[in-house]
Amino acid sequence: MTEPLNDLSRLCIHTITTKNWNLEQAIEGYVQAGVPGVTVWRQWLDGIGAPRAGELLRTSGLDVVSLCRGGFYVADTEAGRSEAVDDNRRAIDEAAAIGAPLVVLVCGAQPGVPLLDARGMIRDGIEASLSHATQCGVKLAIEPLHPMYAADRSAINTIRQANDMAEAIGSPHCGVAVDVYHLWWDPELESEIRRCGEAGRLFAFHVCDWLSPTRDLLNDRGLMGDGCIPIRQIRGWVEATGFHGYNEVEIFSDELWRLDPADFTGKIKTAYLQHV
């Protein structure tokens, strides 16, 4: 059995989780709460800019775990695919500016684009982004999304697909992000986590919970322990590969976003220690 966590030393919170805080408020709130890690979502750089955000983050002492999100490589026109590659280069530049070693990729999908074609576009887009990522010292993590998003958010829907693509690309700067919300149901999850870790491609681990019933396909994730995902078991599989990075709390929830962010952060800490 995986032992429960006894401290917050590997807790990271995504800024999307405390949606009602801007970046400066999130930095202050996480520091006051004793949360050591942050993953910054790109829209939190709007209005402040990556260079200034980087200054604030470095001064705070928070460990910047990653930048979310890059990807969205799928488009039905060549111009759209080219713009996606350009936007990912900008995301890589932003990551470097704020001190994030990783950009997490929501790879993209588009109604009307067959899944096999979309996966080819994703691979082409990642490969077109890699030289810039390597120059900037930033890694790219393919995040497989639940199949319910296959039509319009990501054509990469299983960890096997993510592993296959990262292996085919064959760059040490391209790996996989494991998110329990998207992957907990997969009968190959344990073996594919092992495969990913043994290859040195397990770059990130995201946690939240799956509520039953789920009332909204995007914005009804649960706080850890409020749903049916065996989070601690999956953490054990991840750690068995030698991964000892952050456990990143990423929650989209219209209900939980109504809470005061400081109070919600306290609930996150309690749930993290009890259920992750």
Image (cartoon, rainbow, N blue to C red):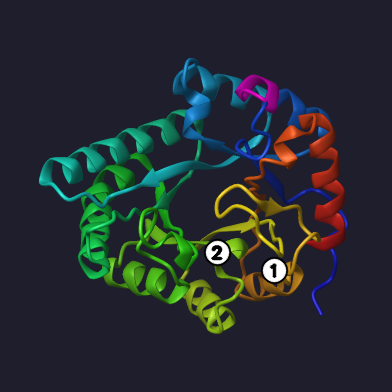
Where is residue 82 drawn, in percent x and y? 17, 42
Residue 188 shown left or right of residue 213 in the figure: left
Any part of residue 86 in sight: yes
Membership of 145 in magenta stretch: no
Figure check: 30 above or below 157: above
Where is residue 74 drawn, in percent x and y? 26, 52
Q: Residues within 10 Å of mark 2 (few under 14, many from 20)?
A: many
> Could you say which is closer to the camera, residue 182 or residue 45?
182
Classified by dominant secondary structure, the portion drawn in magenta counts as helix
Q: How many marks?
A: 2
Residue 250 shown left or right of residue 31 in the figure: left
Mark 1 or 2, nearer chain start: 2
Residue 147 shown left or right of residue 29 in the figure: left
The label nearer to you, 1 versus 2, is 2
Q: Using the image, tell me which numbered label, if any, was put on residue 235.
A: 1
Task: Report, in whole angstroms, how far the alpha carbon at label 1 lies from the one at label 2.
Answer: 14 Å
Figure check: 210 above or below 63: below
The residue segment tinted magenta is 21-26
Where is residue 68 drawn, in percent x and y? 48, 42
Residue visible at 32% across and 45% down in the picture: 133
